[in-house]
Image: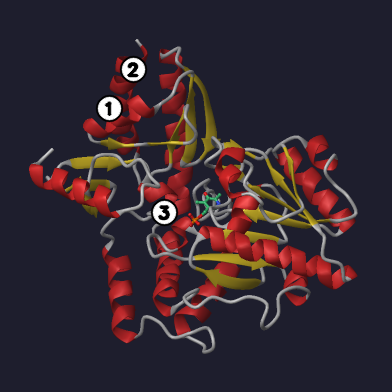
Amino acid sequence: MSVTMQNYIDEAEKALLHTYNRYQVVFEKGEGVYLYDMDGKRYLDFVSGIAVFALGYHHKEYNDALKEQIDKIIHTSNYYYNLPAIEAAKKLKEISGMDRVFFTNSGAEAVEGAVKTARKYAYLKDGTTDHEIIAMNHSFHGRTMGALSVTGNPHYREAFEPMIGNIRFADLNDFDSVMAQVTDKTCAVIFETVQGEGGIYPASEEFMKQVRRLCDERDILLILDEIQCGMGRTGHMFAWQKYGIKPDVMTTAKALGCGVPVGAFLMTEKVGAHSLVAGDHGTTYGGNPLACAAICKVVELFEKEHVLDNVRTVGEYLGTRLEGLMAEFDCIKARRGVGLMQGLAFDRPVGDIITKAMEKGLVLINAGTDIIRFVPPLVISKENVDDMITILRECVREACI
Ligand SMILES: *Cc1c(COP(=O)(O)O)cnc(C)c1O
């Protein structure tokens, strides 16, 4: 590493709060599916800023759209209408089949909004305030207090107790465990259609349908967190769309703006008409013209560049290649996931493998200690997958044999 890059890293460690153990690299620019550090070293990127930069870096049409919007107006306020927000909301309704949109600045805030929506919906029904939400073990919904409260990882929550009250935990894909938590006070069930941080676990179709039926029977809201698995990552615009069901409320963020910080929670007309009203919820930045111009262009480019087709084709290929790698090494225990959201579970911590890969010019990320997660830009090619596998194989060989 150059002295200059090392100096920047030292400066960063003096100034930034130590909430991340960062890899020893300063990324300076990107081009397509490659990142470049300050020293000009090139890296194949299989992380895309954690499932964010779906279209690849330095996408001319996307960048131009943002520049154009910057020159018009970057921010007004939610007290006024703005054209990009109107257009972005219309597009989001189209691709999701939901009816009402609230824009946020992040995923966690989208989850906050979804939780508030569920509580208000239940409050309007019976006038009481002690409603319960069922969330899943091993889930991840964000770091703010509300989102943390429904995050099924005690380690993340412990030091920050007490959480918001009346959250009960069940297991994904175990309907009986959900039923065991249902009471007269249950107002929502929340889970990720594909658990991301928890280790890449997709919800089974059976579980999805059982929970949907339960929610219909008892007028409980089904909230699906699509922040990581949505926006095309599984080969569907939103992962739940392949299950033949529909949530009452859903969240999105990450790839929604492809790098501009933005999220949203969406709901059906029924929920929209019986939950949050003027004064109940708000945000200064949420859905500002710049963020919404990004959303508009992202959705447009998804269609124009047939991103979903690419995810399906290359995603299947990635699955085959990962299975192949698993067959070669005993230390790889399982492959999970779908499309361009997949994981390899190892019998040991994967930190060393990821560090080795970085040295060899491949960016990977873990999900938990033992799982390598593959969430590349959605525009990667089969050749990129081959290149990734070649480097990963070397790293696994060095680590496991
Ligand atoms: C990343 C993530 C969040 C939190 O999003 P932020 O933008 O980091 O607040 C919530 N839910 C899921 C499933 C995520 O992957």
Q: Position of residue 185 (x, y in %)?
A: 86, 56
The residue carrying mark 3 is 52
Q: Nearer the viewer, residue 231 or 108?
A: 108
Crowding near the residue tagged with mark 2, few <14, some 14–19, many ≥20 C-alpha atoms within 10 Å = some
The residue at label 1 has a CB less than 8 Å from ligand 1: no
Can residue 378 be seen by looking at this rendering? no
User: Element under label 2?
Assistant: helix
Q: Give the residue at the far bottom of this rendering.
A: 80
- What is the CA distance from the residue labelled 1 to the residue labelled 2? 9 Å
Is residue 257 shown left or right of residue 179? left
Q: Amino acid at mark 2?
A: Ala
Q: Are marks 1 and 2 in contact (CB under 8 Å)?
A: yes
Q: Position of residue 334 (x, y in %)?
A: 53, 23
Looking at marks 2 and 3 on the same chain, the residue that comes earlier in the sequence is marked by: 3
Q: Are marks 2 and 3 in contact (CB under 8 Å)?
A: no
The residue carrying mark 2 is 399
The residue carrying mark 1 is 356
Q: Amino acid at mark 3?
A: Val
Q: Determine the image quadrant of residue 202.
A: top right
Is residue 15 shown left or right of residue 107? left
The residue at label 3 has a CB less than 8 Å from ligand 1: no
Q: Give the residue at the far top of this rendering.
A: 401
- What is the CA distance from the residue labelled 2 to the residue labelled 3? 29 Å
Looking at marks 1 and 2 on the same chain, the residue that comes earlier in the sequence is marked by: 1
- What is the CA distance from the residue labelled 3 to the residue labelled 1? 23 Å
